[in-house]
Image: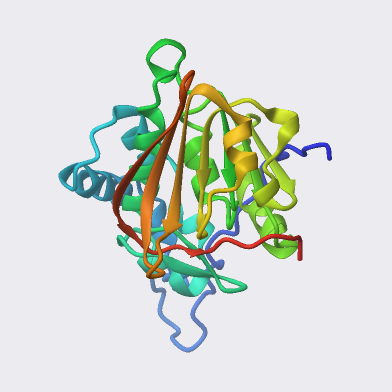
Amino acid sequence: MSERRPGFPARLPGATAPQPGLTRPAVQLVRPAPAPSGLGLDSSAVRARMVRRLGEGGVSSAPVLAAMGAVERHRFVDTALVNQAYEDTSLPIGLGQTISKPSIVARMAELLLGAPCVKTEGLGRVLEIGTGCGYQAAVLGRVAREVYTIERLRALHEKARENLRPLRLSNVHLILGDGMLGYPKGAPYAAIISAAGGEMLPQTWCDQLAVGGRLVAPMAGPDGRQSLLVVDKTAQGLKQTILEAVNFVPLKSGVA
């Protein structure tokens, strides 16, 4: 399947034009109509506060913090939820899926940058499993040379395309497909990241990971609870490290 790149930016809707007063004969200042909810969230100061909280929470990677500050998270959530966009919480994006909270997006991106191959080459080609609304792909697009991101739900694939189009990230490629199969055409990958967790790590992901690359994904244990799993691929094999508890949507196969 050929990947499609985000196109040219669409113009964002502005505030409603003010209407002159009709009931008072005297000249008066015309007040603009109320701004749409969340309009002020495009201020860099709002994102700067979020970035400071991420730093206080332990994220230290300068490229990751810069990416988190540059990507406007409120553009990726529904209008009714924009006032919560910069809180450290996951939010629903439809079809039973969520946008991950900023701290986990930053944490996972920082883990990817810690891959052995990054020390010499920088973060090259990344495979993301579960595009969702496109927010994490936008962040990854600012810290990696190239990003292939797969979404199995057609409606979310289209939503992500609309969300990412204004950003004009030519290095982010959106794919509609079964993420459990990975994307062999782009392999090998310096990093693979999953936004959904299963009970087993798909062998296809391990096969498509480059030697020196790193995979970061939630993984469910025997009790059903998820933990963050880091897999480093070496010349001798796979090295697995289990980190903190997390809570992601379940990993599923197929395209819907």
Between 63 and 70, the one nearer to me in the picture: 63
Which residue is located at x 19 percent, y 48 percent?
57
Between 124 and 247, the one nearer to me in the picture: 247
Q: Is residue 179 above or below residue 232?
A: below
Question: To which quarter of the image does residue 29 belong?
Answer: bottom left
Q: Is residue 18 visible?
A: yes
Between 208 and 148, the one nearer to me in the picture: 208
The answer to whether 51 appears left or right of 191 in the picture is left
| Percent of width and height locating residue 251 | 57, 61
- Give the farthest residue toward the right: 1
| Percent of width and height locating residue 126 | 56, 32
- Give the farthest residue toward the left: 56
Instruction: Work out which quarter of the rendered image holds the N terminus and state it.
Output: top right
Question: To which quarter of the image does residue 31 belong?
Answer: bottom left
| Percent of width and height locating residue 74 | 45, 58
The answer to whether 4 appears left or right of 89 in the picture is right
Between 136 and 191, the one nearer to me in the picture: 191
Colour mapping used in the image: rainbow
Question: To which quarter of the image does residue 137 belong?
Answer: top right
Which residue is located at x 27 percent, y 44 percent?
51
Q: Is residue 239 above or below residue 244?
A: above
Q: Is residue 169 visible?
A: no
Instruction: Work out which quarter of the rendered image holds the C terminus and state it.
Output: bottom right
- Give the farthest residue toward the top: 120
Number of numbered tags placed on the structure image? 0
Which residue is located at x 30 percent, y 60 percent?
88
